[in-house]
Amino acid sequence: MSKNKTAGYKGPHGYQKRKEGDGRSCVRYKCGLTNTIQDVLRQRPGWMEVKDDGEWDFNWCDVGWLRENFDHSYMEEHVRICHFRNHYELTRKNLMVKNLKRYRKTLEREAGRIEAAKCDFFPRTFELPSEYHLFVEEFKRSPGSTWIMKPVARSQGKGIFLFQKLKDIMDWKKDGSRSEEQRDETQVESYVAQRYIENPYLISGRKFDLRVYVLVTSYIPLKAWLYRDGFARFSSTRFSLTSIDDQYVHLTNVAVQKTAPDYDPEKGCKWQMQQLRRYLTARHGTETIEALFKDVDNIFVRSLQSVQKVIINDKHCFELYGYDILLDQDLKPWLIEVNASPSLTASSQEDYEMKCCLLEDTLHIVDMEGRLTGREKRVGGYDLMWNDGPVYREDVNLETLGSACFTANTHLGCVNDRKKQLRQLLKPFPGKKRI
Amino acid sequence: MMDEGTELSLTIAQIVQRLKATNLHSQIERQAKECLHRPEIQLESLKEDVRNFLKASGWERKLQNAVYRELHVQPLPRHPAAPPEHAKEPLAYMRKAQVNWEKRILKSLNSMCTELGVPLARKRPAVEQKELTNKWNEMGTDEPGKWTSQSICSVRRLNTPSYSISHDSQVLISLRNPNHDSSEEASAKSHWGLIQVPLHDRDIPQMREAYSELSLTTGQLGIDDHTHVPPVLLCYECASVCVVPVVNEQDSAAAQQYSRQGCPTGLRADLWALVLNSTNEPEDVMHYEQLKAGVIHHDLLVDNLIYKDVKLTASNDDYYFVFEDFLYQVLLCFSRDTAVLEHFSYNSATPPKSYIQGEPFYPCRGRVIPFHGFSMYVAPLCFLYNEPSKLYSVFREMYVRYFFRLHSVSSSTSGIVSLCLQFERLLQTHLPQLFYHLREIGAQPLRIAFKWMVRAFSGYLSTDQLLLLWDRILGYDSLEIVAVLAAAVFAFRAENLMEVTSLTSAEAVLADLSTLKVMPLIQIFLFATVI
């Protein structure tokens, strides 16, 4: 809650139009988390933490706080908060699928089959128990297939399991060996059953998935940034379909891997995105992998477009999403899920530095200090991916318009020379001399 | 002294001899016979026509590549009266040092056997063989002792001379040429470093000529090519235009020349295989399968060393841990490969041999005893090749051309002794203040740089940078660039190093090389240093 006690910062135009230089040199922030974000906020020049009920200009909250307080808060124009009110339309597995399916139908109606096929990046998914019969039909159509059951609202791999027989999930409903607590929970909890990707791309026999960061600062119009860094998370054991009970084989969340018997924290089971991209390029060639990353871009854009009309747009809100992508052996990327609160806890020094840079750049884009013009295509490690339309690397003007060759302005897994770029881009913080 | 003509015909004769024994020879012979049916082959001009056919169908190129490869691994041509040891190593005192070193290693291996009460080799029972066959692709999941007769964790002996790198450096430091009296040299010319043998080394002006493709004005690949920024990297675009024909033509020599400026990521695997003339024909795959069968039937004592090495080094590395299984698959086969024996004709080392009940026995038939860090020679290659037989083929070729020189005592310019000396001389000549300072605080630079050079920087640089360095090793057919890089690293961190006051702090300054960009460092050191 932020009351109007900010005398001294009102410019001649009030806060109606954010102009360059019209930003704040003292930002009061509230932070509900105790990990990397705390360090980043604390180190930002001119930012001060407010405790308890103090007024704030910026709030990095968790979704619980949001749920309880957002509707009762009045926010001044300049105030920023790190979630959209109904982000769960994108981040809860059942809602995401519902929105995607609906979007796909609309696309097919309006633009034809081929265009709609661009949305085929999520495996067949059904919500249970509501779509149970539809699921059974699909299940019977593909005998011998493996499916994965996921609770819609949990994270970090909790409650997930694989099955190949219908009776496995019936058993589960009736299974007395499940603990009391779980049985009670399952009564209220929705699950999704999703076709398991049986031919994941393996590196040296191991399965991995990708974590990619996308920052959305507005849904209408849609403005989204893609961060160049990210990582590939490996499962600690070799992939095999013979042991579907073995969580450690199939689930790549670090939280799950950490409990694996041979997990060695010194070892780490992550590769930086740059490393992965280089590996894939060495293996398959530049063109193939460029095409792959283009398909990955497509996933981000389409998934955001599918919820564009549903999410309550609010100029105070921005959101940093953690996308989980899986590659199969044909180098097709699949969307596993979208996280509204991607883990900001660091698993190693390298990871810590990456997340610090990610969060710093996020704050640069949110731009409480008013240092950006709003016309930037790149800020630090972020590239502007979508701005009410695709964003291209090349400058589009009358001369180049005729040319058919435009490349998307995304650089996932490419060199991230953010420090250099930021030095050239940003004015020093208000009150500080340029270094 | 042989005259050039004799030398040449001797070399040709040797190469022809070696190629006659290869599969390529029988393939070409068969092709020549089969082409006789073709309409364009006329009886009158038979020889000419067959030659043209072989040229057009790519066989001539394959032959060229094979000859090119032989030239790389040829022992030095020697005088007919010289004994065979001279081909391995012309300097007597070096040979002697190598022999002594090997004796100590072998002795330590033998006592390991005695102490553990295990044989050097053991045939696996049928049940174990079957299990190992099933688990071949995931040996990394098991405990290290599972497939050997003794759990290695309890073996403290593995920290002995046969195994550790610090011992290697001791041997080199104590090398002296008995014919050389250094007391007469003026003190200004004296060498400040640890290596005190009078081997030939090059200075920067000579290197500028030798490494002209690395000059500041020549574009280098891999500096920014993964940002795919079109206007800036005409280098990359040129590269795509130039390199694809090289790959299509399958020309080893051209590929080697090309690698001097770095290989594009997407084509590196093919280019390296070309430069090394490493093929993945059915007979290569079969050879690999035979080696694999050997691993399954017998367990060797040296396998313990391999398991331990992989677990301690590659498995703990942030990037290479993924390739653990590949490393076992390659290294276990490597230690059984008798084809590696060939390289001993030009290696100053001798295959280690011991005696069991009076009978000579080779503890590892490939004749190379793995040591701590050995798996790091293979790990970066896993990044490029994922078929075990192909990976094996490339690794073996790299080993017999380059890596073996990093752990045997010899006078070769690519040998570890020369590299150490080259490194020290470069530092003393161009950074005398730094060298003097480090020496005074008891931090001889070689003590820090040795471990980098023995591994050709594997595990110290980030993978992409390491591969760029190895591009040049292949391109220039020499490990000398490794010594240059070591000196360049010191030059880069000179400012910080001038402020340290102990060996430990010097080591701390140089502990993390993972952020270094190799090519700019080398370029600046070679081409921007004021002479």
Image (cartoon, coloured by chain):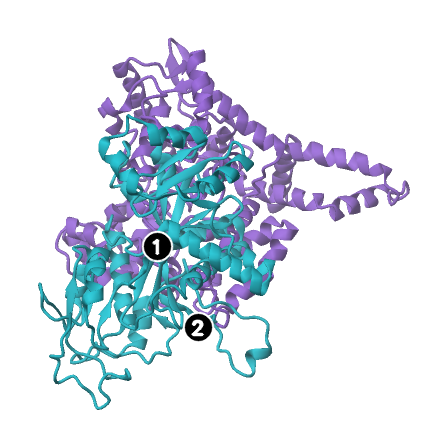
Chain colours: A cyan, B purple
State the SS at label 2: loop
The residue wearing badge 1 is A91
The first of marks 1 and 2 along the sequence is 1
- Residue at the far top: name it: B357
For disc 2, the chain is A
Quarter of the image holding residue B348? top left
Q: What residue is rendered at 15% in x and 57% in y? A: B500
Q: Residues within 10 Å of mark 1 (few under 14, many from 20)?
A: many
Quarter of the image holding residue A321? bottom left
Instruction: Please say if A24 is above or below B376.
Output: below
Depth check: give the residue in front, B431 or B66: B66
State the SS at label 1: helix
Q: Residues within 10 Å of mark 2 (few under 14, many from 20)?
A: few
Q: For the residue marked with disc 2, what is the amino acid? A: Asp
The residue wearing badge 2 is A388
User: Does residue A331 appear to the left or right of A18 in the view shown?
Assistant: right
- Where is residue B40 shown, x and y percent of the image? 87, 45
Depth check: give the residue in front, A97 or B45: A97
- Where is residue B386 shown, x and y percent of the image? 49, 40
Q: CA distance from mark 1 to mark 2?
A: 22 Å
Front position among marks 1 and 2: 1
Q: What residue is rendered at 86% in x and 43% in y? A: B41
- Quadrant including the N terminus of chain A: bottom left
User: Does residue A110 appear to the left or right of B306 in the view shown?
Assistant: right
